[in-house]
Amino acid sequence: MDIKKRIGERIHQSRRKLGLSIKALSEKTGTLAAPRIGNWENGTRSPGPVEAIILSKALNVAASYLLCLSDDERGEIAMPESCLARAVPMVLLANAHRFVQSSKNQNDLSTLPEVTGNISLENKSKETASKKVFAITIMDNSMHPKFSTQDIVIVDPEKKPQPGDFVLAHIAGSGANIIRKYRESDQHSMKNKSFELITLNSDWGIVRVSNANEAEILATVLEHRAYL
């Protein structure tokens, strides 16, 4: 439908909703002549911003609604879901393993006791991220120079890591939760799930995992945020 016709239809519907004739609406505005309103409703002409504001006050709707800038009579503009920020929970690195275990049967992650706050997810990650994503803060320099202390990473427990991905892992013996680069070992196969957790800082050792009881991949890194 032509925009002039759409505007005219909204003026007409808003007027009829109040039970007003065109003449009565003209008198209510105090300044807008009935023929002008008739032309607007017929779609032969359209009101300007000033006229739309005068009409809106008389019709109890927003001027932006009459001008088809909003589909809400109050003038509120609904943002597409893709443009809305998505908050994901922040969790202390030390509590990441417990959080992942607790989140498996939990829909609202924000209610879990390990959550300390939240952070917004980037639009590019929203398309692929699961509902279980969360964020942690880097606490050491084992992954320097790519990751520094106090950098934030957002991780997804439901994303299976591929060789070369950065992952959040839990070491069973020490109970530590660490960020490392994932690499399948030379012996890796369908039956043998051995892998290595590589540091980027040579001062820190490589963790070689040959048994599922030794370590667990908790999540795969989706985003890395570095701050000056």
Image (cartoon, rainbow, N blue to C red):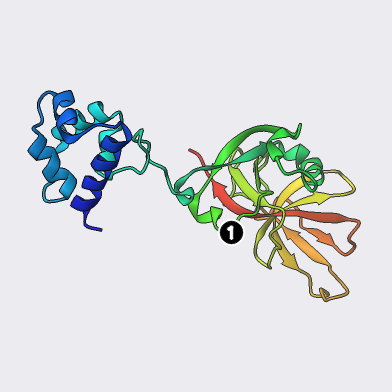
Identify the residue at image location x=17%, y=35%. 22
The 10 Å Cα crowd at callout 1, few under 14, some 14 to 19, many 20 or more, is: few
| Residue 59 rendering spot, x and y as whole percentages | 27, 30
| Position in image of residue 210 (x %, y %) | 88, 64
Residue that numbered label 1 is attached to = 128
Residue 138 vs residue 214: left or right?
left
Could you tell whether 48 is left or right of 223 in the image?
left
- 100 or 168: nearer the viewer: 100
* Marker count (numbered): 1
Residue 166 to residue 111: above or below:
below
Whole-percent x, y for residue 11 in the image: 24, 40
Q: Seen in the image, is 166 located left or right of residue 189?
A: left
Above/below status of 53 relative to 88: above
Q: Residue at x 14, y 25 (%)?
A: 27
Q: Is residue 22 visible?
A: yes
Q: Quadrant of the N terminus?
A: bottom left
Q: Provide residue 126's location: percent of width, then percent of height.
A: 55, 53
Q: Is residue 199 above or below residue 134?
A: below
Q: Quadrant of residue 193?
A: bottom right
Relative to the observer, which residue lies in front, 29 or 74? 29
Task: Tell me what residue is drawn at x 69 percent, y 55 percent.
Answer: 167
* Residue at the image point whose x is 74% and y is 48% from the top: 178
Could you tell whether 28 is left or right of 117 in the image? left
- Asked which secondary structure carries label 1, the reply is loop
Report the amino acid beneath label 1: Thr
Q: Quadrant of residue 117?
A: top right
Residue 47 visible (yes or no): no
- In the foreground, 120 or 153: 120
